[in-house]
Image (tube, rainbow, N blue to C red):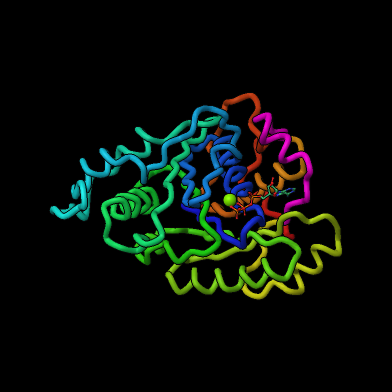
Amino acid sequence: MKVAVAGKGGVGKTTVSAFLARCWRDLGYEVVAVDADPDANLAGTLGYRGPDITPLVKLKSLIEERVGGGEGWGGFLKMNPRVDDIPGEFGVVIDGVRVLVMGTIERGRRGCACPENILLREVLNHLILRSQEHVVVDMEAGVEHLGRGTAEGVDTMLVVVEPGWASLQTASRVAELARDLGIRQVRAIANKISGDADLAFVRENLAGPPLVGVLPLDRDLEPQARSGNVSRERPFYQEMLRIALDVAPAVLPPVCSCPDNPTGGKTAGATKEAL
Ligand SMILES: Nc1ncnc2c1ncn2[C@@H]1O[C@H](COP(=O)(O)OP(=O)(O)OP(=O)(O)O)[C@@H](O)[C@H]1O
Ligand SMILES: [Mg+2]
């Protein structure tokens, strides 16, 4: 299952990505969470407190070894470098989730056939199109930098919205772009909902993607992220767990012998409730 998470700045993309990864992990899946936002904080949101993680884009010798180019990259560039070992080798395991930090392509070099672009594109391609793991990609606000070929491998784009005009407008633009790129399914998640009026506002004004989940405003999320201690009892986690199952309806959770199976033995089908 491959999911990309998008939406306006600050709506909760990284929070949703982190919880989706965590829920899948709790269900027993191997998960790779990709931080594709230049302002990377997915690892921190998952509770990482170690030394700074070097993003892939800064691994110059790896890029040169795999793609070629070198200083001034005047030389020959390999367009299909080997990348299948990169998530395993350079991903950092946080709370059971493998996190891969992509890093920022300099503004002037975005979209060009630079060695670092080739490597990032190929790693994302590999994860979306060929890897066996569940993959969640925390995107920048838009989806423009997903190439068409990669986008077609994304099973679901989750567009996060909050009760406010701007995020709803961004959501319909993002949903349209996602469909143009060939993403098969686009779903919205209403986040930071603190009452019926918030939810009614989102429902009335969300043009386009159907809602797949409603996440409460929860002031404990930040302290939980800071302490790395996530409560599985709270409604935020429980709703994310339901969403995690809902976006992967064809995939039933493995029969888990772990004592704290958070599904309580339910199957994906059993947890599908009408919103
Ligand atoms: N349901 C919620 N309740 C309370 N706070 C929330 C909720 N969802 C997210 N937040 C908080 O809102 C802030 C922004 O969330 P987050 O970083 O996930 O957004 P983002 O969309 O990834 O932002 P950016 O566009 O900067 O990458 C964070 O402080 C986060 O803890
Ligand atoms: Mg973010």
Q: Count every numbered label the image shows and give the total.
A: 0
Quarter in which the C terminus is drawn: bottom right
Q: Nearer the viewer, residue 164 or 230?
A: 164
Instruction: Indicate yes or no whether the magenta region holds residue 43.
Output: no
When the figure is inspected, residue 174 is found, relative to residue 215, above or below; the finding is below
In the picture as drawn, the residue positioned furthest to the top comes out as: 259
Residue drawn where x is 13% and y is 53% of the image:
75
Q: Position of residue 23 (x, y in %)?
A: 60, 40
Q: Nearer the viewer, residue 228 or 274?
A: 228
Q: Is residue 128 left or right of residue 217?
A: left
Q: Position of residue 61 (x, y in %)?
A: 26, 38
Residue drawn where x is 37% and y is 61% of the image:
110
When the figure is inspected, residue 256 is found, relative to residue 275, above or below; the finding is above
Q: Is residue 3 left or right of residue 268?
A: left
Residue drawn where x is 72% and y is 61% of the image:
162
Q: Position of residue 272 (x, y in %)?
A: 67, 53
Q: Nearer the viewer, residue 114 or 95?
A: 114
Magenta part of the chain: 214-232
Quarter-of-image position of residue 230: top right
Instruction: Indicate yes or no whether the magenta region holds residue 217.
Output: yes
Q: Nearer the viewer, residue 117 or 46?
A: 117
Residue drawn where x is 65% and y is 36% of the image:
265
Q: Position of residue 213 (x, y in %)?
A: 69, 56
In the picture as drawn, the residue positioned furthest to the left comes out as: 76
